[in-house]
Amino acid sequence: ETGVTQTPRHLVMGMTNKKSLKCEQHLGHNAMYWYKQSAKKPLELMFVYNFKEQTENNSVPSRFSPECPNSSHLFLHLHTLQPEDSALYLCASSPRQGATNEKLFFGSGTQLSVL
Amino acid sequence: QQQVKQSPQSLIVQKGGISIINCAYENTAFDYFPWYQQFPGKGPALLIAIRPDVSEKKEGRFTISFNKSAKQFSLHIMDSQPGDSATYFCAAAPNTGNQFYFGTGTSLTVIP
């Protein structure tokens, strides 16, 4: 295991639902990330938190709302999603943001389907 | 604009053969080039990485070849095995910040 745990593994939700994705890392890292993985597309960086502070928001729609209560936990709150938001959502961590030889440790992802 | 272009999209190789995946980039500020391996149902995991001060890096059966002038780098998997069947992503990162730019991935199938 990578030390990054994501729950749930699978999620099916309607467009009017509200749900949350959870990520927990046991590596003592200070940076955490949300990526979106869609078929035949590059991994898309959504949000970055460094020492619990959000440092990157790559023009993500407001229907995605991140929360980082501490350096070990990261949430992605979802509401009024669209079918095109169906994808694999990956959480990752690294010791800290800003060092270019940092290795990203990914969780196994949450496969989200929006009906 | 796609920062890192990866090819081929899919690749089928016989066991024992050489698998080659290519990536190209434009941004000369990139100075770190990792490759990630992803098995079904798992997140990507770092496989091997290179910096532009060397032209080649080898770790076991995996080799990165780097051509700075052409702004291209490639992953070679020697003696490919069925257990290597996975999706491979190249990536690039600049020397400031840590925004990783990923390729679109290559699905490798190694036939026994």
Image (cartoon, rainbow, N blue to C red):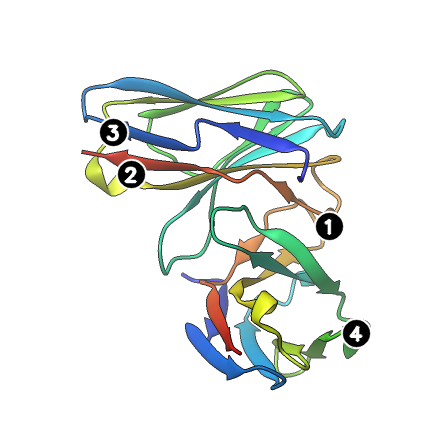
Residue behind mark 2: A85
Give the number of the mark in front: 4 or 2: 4
* B17 displayed left or right of B105: right
Q: Looking at the picture, do discs 4 and 2 lie on one chain?
A: no
Rate crowding at label 4 as few (under 14), some (14 to 19) or many (20 or more) other CA atoms within 10 Å. Answer: some
| Secondary structure of residue under mark 1 | loop
C-beta proximity under 8 Å, tags 1 and 4: no
Q: Is residue A83 visible?
A: yes
Q: Looking at the picture, do discs 1 and 3 lie on one chain?
A: yes
C-beta proximity under 8 Å, tags 2 and 3: yes
Q: Quadrant of residue A70?
A: top right
Q: Considering only order in the chain, which callout, 2 or 1, is on the residue closer to the N terminus? A: 2
Type of amino acid at the residue the image marks with label 4 = Lys
C-beta proximity under 8 Å, tags 3 and 4: no
The label on residue A100 is: 1
Q: Where residue A75 sits in the image (x, y, percent)?
A: 49, 21
Quarter occupied by the N terminus of chain A: top right
Q: Where residue B18 sits in the image (x, y, percent)?
A: 61, 85
Rate crowding at label 3 as few (under 14), some (14 to 19) or many (20 or more) other CA atoms within 10 Å. Answer: many
Give the alpha-carbon distance from disc 1 to disc 2, as whole Å: 29 Å
Type of amino acid at the residue the image marks with label 2 = Asp
Residue behind mark 3: A81
Give the number of the mark in front: 1 or 3: 3
